[in-house]
Amino acid sequence: MSLDIIEMAARIRALGDQIVPATIEGTAQLYGPYHEREPYQGVKVSRDLAYGSDARHLLDVFEPGSAAAARPVLLFVHGGGFVAGDKHHPGSPYQDNVALWAVRHGMVGVNMTYRLAPQHPWPAGAMDVGAAVAWVRSHVGHHGGDPDRIILMGTSAGAAHAAAYAVNTRFHADGEPGLAGLVLLSGLYDMVTAPGNDLKVAYFGDDPANYAAGSTLTGLTRTPIPLLLVLTEMDPPEFQRQTLVLLEQYLQRNGRLPYFVHMMGHNHLSSTMHLNTADTFLGERLLDFIALHRQATG
Amino acid sequence: MSLDIIEMAARIRALGDQIVPATIEGTAQLYGPYHEREPYQGVKVSRDLAYGSDARHLLDVFEPGSAAAARPVLLFVHGGGFVAGDKHHPGSPYQDNVALWAVRHGMVGVNMTYRLAPQHPWPAGAMDVGAAVAWVRSHVGHHGGDPDRIILMGTSAGAAHAAAYAVNTRFHADGEPGLAGLVLLSGLYDMVTAPGNDLKVAYFGDDPANYAAGSTLTGLTRTPIPLLLVLTEMDPPEFQRQTLVLLEQYLQRNGRLPYFVHMMGHNHLSSTMHLNTADTFLGERLLDFIALHRQATG
């Protein structure tokens, strides 16, 4: 079954720009037929390795059956509005597809999950990302990965957690973030101006003091970590607005933009759900980002 | 000779972010070896067709040796700070490479030149684009092109001229812009806040009233023409700032961004100079843009 990118874009657009179950399910179904199903050929999957003591302190490691040299590591943080989501649902191709894409393109893929609000409010998500990064740094060498080349990628709430970890030294195990790159897809970076809603209150509470602490906008303009921002055509307007504000403040401080990918014909979900299909939109840019950074520092 | 995109990015970055002769020449030389040289295989080139009465009212049409159906048309407007530049320099692969890329990807390519400042100040450039569009609409059918599918693409000063034509009805021959798409690379859209310099004064004069009239910012947020904005990593900060302002105002008005491509590892010149080489960065996004629009309207 060949994937018609243009036809797919039409279907994605028809789903609208709100993040509601029909959009989430609709997007998942659209890309479903194009994904690999288990068992994954030539890939060794180690599931549910514990990086902490909570029942959700779990990650899956995807490595090649055999590899010559240590590979860069893509550590992926799923979305779910702070209150839902998982790294893997048995029978579903998501989020395995992200880690599979990494393995199929010269990396080791690690998919993590994390504690959820409201039981675990701010900064539980950022702390969990930190614990997972520490675990990867210690253990990924045994899975064919290079602990000095970890690319942290988060989407939606996962982008908020990944960003919060990256810009706050108090979450860094060794005083350093330990990241070779940070990829943020469709996140919210300024919780002060983000419209109040149940999800925001569930994770950040109703004390505005937490909204400032939980904002990563300023920190992201100052991070020395190579940064790639991603936004989709059909992201809700508030996500688009927040990414633009971040781009603007980054430019003001640094005299140039961070790497930025605007995904035509994609939505809040398909930006990750299309990975490891014949649609190489984000994949090619991710590979460029990783390769360009390698050159810049290596 | 194979093109190493990562190595090329390093060389592009080393040229800096100022638009000076060393950067322009350096970029031209970097990509030179990867370009086709005349005679171009399987392409019919009609040079210096006159679309008006001035010595610079000239365009080159690139069409396939044979074609089954009428093709979309890419009409390209070169840059040069309002005071310089040309569609073709004998012996140089530029800007032939843009029209060649178009022909190699299912289109007819048309490269136009236009009158220059200070002899021909605002709005000569916009008027010339209008005259060229009118010529293409009338004549491109004889060159295998579809007059109803003209994509207008301009870079730098050429983007300013293309935008000014697109958003001002007074330049439209039939009351309609006659465009199926508008692609603007590294342009300045707000001449009021653009820093004063010799080039600005040469074309827009020193009367601020012209700066408002020559600004396309507001018009671009309202245009019904499908819009693709392009910016490069190494564009001078003012170009980056102006594109961000346009994105922001477009979002405010339309609830979503126009299509936007941020070119990692590229500069103000290479965004067009890399077209028709093994680096498909902008080319792939242009093809997506054209295909996605076809779907949206067809």
Image (cartoon, coloured by chain):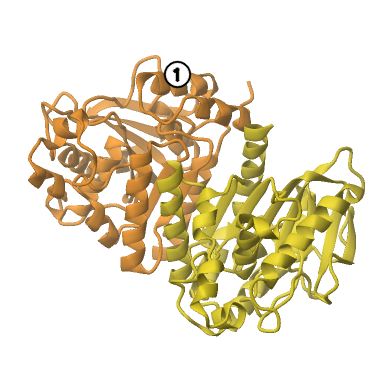
Chain colours: A yellow, B orange
As drawn, B36 above or below A34: above
In the rendered view, tell whether residue B163 sits above or below residue B10: below
**In the image, what residue occupies the spot 51% across and 21% down?**
B30
Mark 1: give few (<14), some (14-19) or many (20+) Cα within 10 Å. Answer: few
Which chain is disc 1 placed on? Answer: B
User: Closer to the camera, B79 or A3?
Assistant: B79
Residue toward you, A68 or A32: A68
Give left or right: position of A56 versus B249.
Answer: right
Element type at mark 1: loop
The one nearer the camera, B180 or A18, is A18
Q: Amino acid at mark 1?
A: Glu
Residue B179 position (above or below residue B224) = above
The answer to whether B26 appears left or right of B136 in the picture is right
Query: Could you say where residue A164 lies in the image, as x and y percent from the top left?
Result: 61, 62
On the image, which quarter does residue B176 sit in? Answer: bottom left
Q: Is residue B289 left or right of residue A80?
A: left
Residue tagged 1: B38
Query: Can residue B136 be spotted in the picture?
Result: no
* Residue A33 picture location, percent across and down: 72, 68
